[in-house]
Amino acid sequence: MRKGVFNYLILAVFAISAAFMSCDKNPDDPGENGNGNGGEEDISGVYVAGGSNGIWKNGVRQNLTGNTQYASSSSVFVSNNNVYVAGTDYGKAILWKNGVIQNLTIGSGNSYANSVFASGNNVYVVGLDNGQAVLWKNGEIQNLTNGVTSSSAYSVFVSNNDVYVAGQIKQQTQQPDRAVLWKNGVAQFLSGEGSQALSVYVADEDVYVAGYTLVRMSGVWGYYRYVTVWKNGVPQFLAEGGQNTSTKAHSVFVSGNDVYVVGSIDNSAALWKNGVKQNLTGSAAYSVFVSSNDVYVAGTDNKQAVLWKNGVKQILIDGDKANANSVFVVE
């Protein structure tokens, strides 16, 4: 065989091999990060869940396809380049992963997904199903109570393979709810009757829970409502809001030695840093996240979804009425 022909054949083999290699990677393959971009999309940004059929990223609305037009998002979490959004679609709990919807319940009763957390290869969602507090782990439902009375689960956090869930249980039908923290399915009551746990955060060995507590008024019938944060089961009252039912702590976040709590008192949004109150211009604050010394708070003002960054308010537009329920920041 002549040298020129031999070289020609070698080049032909290389060309054919390159063609096969280029065809081997499907352009529709989601890639390592599972979001359909082959790892090229910039996942960093400020994510806010709220409103109908979507979330905001850096203030821009991103649509999520629900089963109906009534789908809403309540919580967002980003892990391993995957964006998880928990929500509810016409009375059914749902979870989006990178925009792909998963139905968490298929029964006839109502269900709601309130919070999502991803740890390793596991995805945890909490909420309620048929009036009972439940935890979904990778789509498999787990009851948190015996189902005798009503209960709810509002927040989930995973640390060192321990699963913490904040919520409430009504021990007797005609009695007020009691704030409860489940650790690996075992319930611990945080306060007496007339309390609610809405958020949980674990830092090192310390467990923080945010919510509210009712305290009986002295000498007369009635209760005062207190914004409350529990640290390892011990309550701290941050503010007293009279009998206003809007008074409560919605979210807690720990950064370094600082503890941030957001909520509402007398229909006004507020942020507490290490127990010191800072007023926010708005009606209610539902979620707080701290990143690179910047403090992000999601909430609502006059029925409009808003995001505060270091106290400066940005209006997020989604129709006429919407809440910003959850914020998550990726550097």
Image (cartoon, helix red, strand yellow):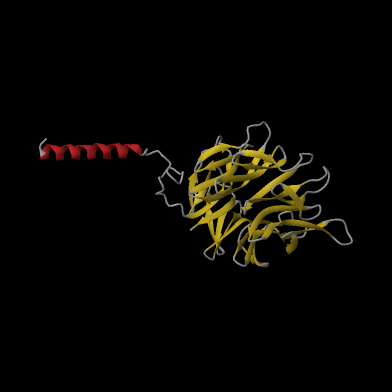
- Residue 66 drawn above or below residue 324: above
Q: Please report the residue visible at 62 percent of the width from the left and 67 percent of the height from the top.
A: 257
Residue 253, by quadrant, is: bottom right
Residue 174, by quadrant, is: top right
Q: Position of residue 328 (x, y in %)?
A: 55, 54
Across the whole image, how many numbered discs are drawn on residues?
A: 0
Q: Position of residue 247 (x, y in %)?
A: 71, 57
Q: Nearer the viewer, residue 51 or 183?
A: 183
Q: Nearer the viewer, residue 70 or 210?
A: 210
Is residue 251 visible to the viewer in this orientation of the structure? no
**Would residue 66 be found to the left or right of residue 185 on screen?**
left
**Would residue 71 be found to the left or right of residue 274 on screen?**
left
Is residue 192 visible to the viewer in this orientation of the structure? yes
Residue at the outermost front position = 1
Residue at the outermost top position = 108
Q: Nearer the viewer, residue 257 or 110?
A: 257
Q: Please report the residue visible at 31 percent of the width from the left and 39 percent of the height from the top.
A: 21
- Residue 35 drawn above or below residue 215: above
Q: Nearer the viewer, residue 251 or 216?
A: 251
Q: Position of residue 198 (x, y in %)?
A: 68, 52
- Residue 204 drawn above or below residue 324: below
Quadrant holding the N terminus:
top left
